[in-house]
Image (cartoon, rainbow, N blue to C red):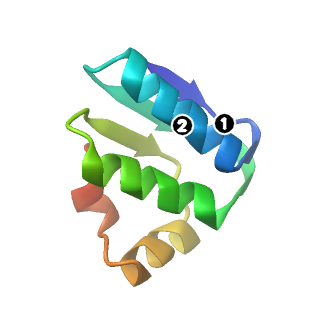
Amino acid sequence: MLVLAFDLFDLAGAHDVVDAVRADPDAVVVDLSRAREVHDHAVATLAAIAARSDVPLRVLGLREHDRRMLRYLGFEAAELFAG
């Protein structure tokens, strides 16, 4: 299942990813490349989803700021997100 973020990826968008993971247990791809603004707490929520779920979660378009924030939280984006 593909989840596209346009313009803004916030906590509501992260909750859409939670719903997608529940709906499609095979794999979920989140494309942030078109999002103009990505909220930190939404990225942290993605990290929590990936850490707790057996569903492969692939996130495209993470910016350097997002990767740095994940490292501060103790996650490596490459290890956390499949692909």
Seen in the image, is 51 located left or right of residue 45? left
Q: Secondary structure at mark 1?
A: loop
Q: Is residue 9 above or below residue 21?
A: below
User: Does the rendering let one see residue 32?
Assistant: no
Give how far across and how far down residue 50 sits, in percent. 32, 48
Q: Going 54% across and 37% down the picture, which residue do you hit? A: 31
Crowding near the residue tagged with mark 1, few <14, some 14–19, many ≥20 C-alpha atoms within 10 Å: some
Give how far across and how far down residue 71 sits, in percent. 38, 78
Q: Going 53% across and 49% down the picture, which residue do you hit? A: 61
Crowding near the residue tagged with mark 2, few <14, some 14–19, many ≥20 C-alpha atoms within 10 Å: some
Residue linked to disc 2:
31
State if disc 2 and disc 1 touch (CB < 8 Å).
yes
Disc 2 marks which amino acid?
Answer: Asp
Q: How many numbered marks appear?
A: 2
In the image, which disc is placed on residue 50?
none
Between residues 15 and 65, which one lies in front from this camera angle? Answer: 15
Query: Residue 35: which quarter of the image?
Result: top right
User: Does the rendering let one see residue 5?
Assistant: yes
Between residues 19 and 60, which one lies in front from this camera angle? Answer: 19
Who comes first in sequence, dot 1 or dot 2? Answer: 1
Quadrant housing the C terminus: top left
Disc 1 marks which amino acid?
Answer: Ala
Give how far across and how far down residue 64 sits, in percent. 52, 70
Q: Is residue 19 above or below residue 83?
A: above
Quadrant housing the N terminus: top left
Q: Is residue 50 above or below residue 69?
A: above
Q: Going 58% across and 38% down the picture, which residue do you hit? A: 15
Seen in the image, is 50 located left or right of residue 30? left
Q: Is residue 48 above or below residue 35?
A: below
For the residues labelled 1 and 2, the Cα–Cα distance comes to: 6 Å
Q: Secondary structure at mark 2?
A: strand
Residue linked to disc 1:
5
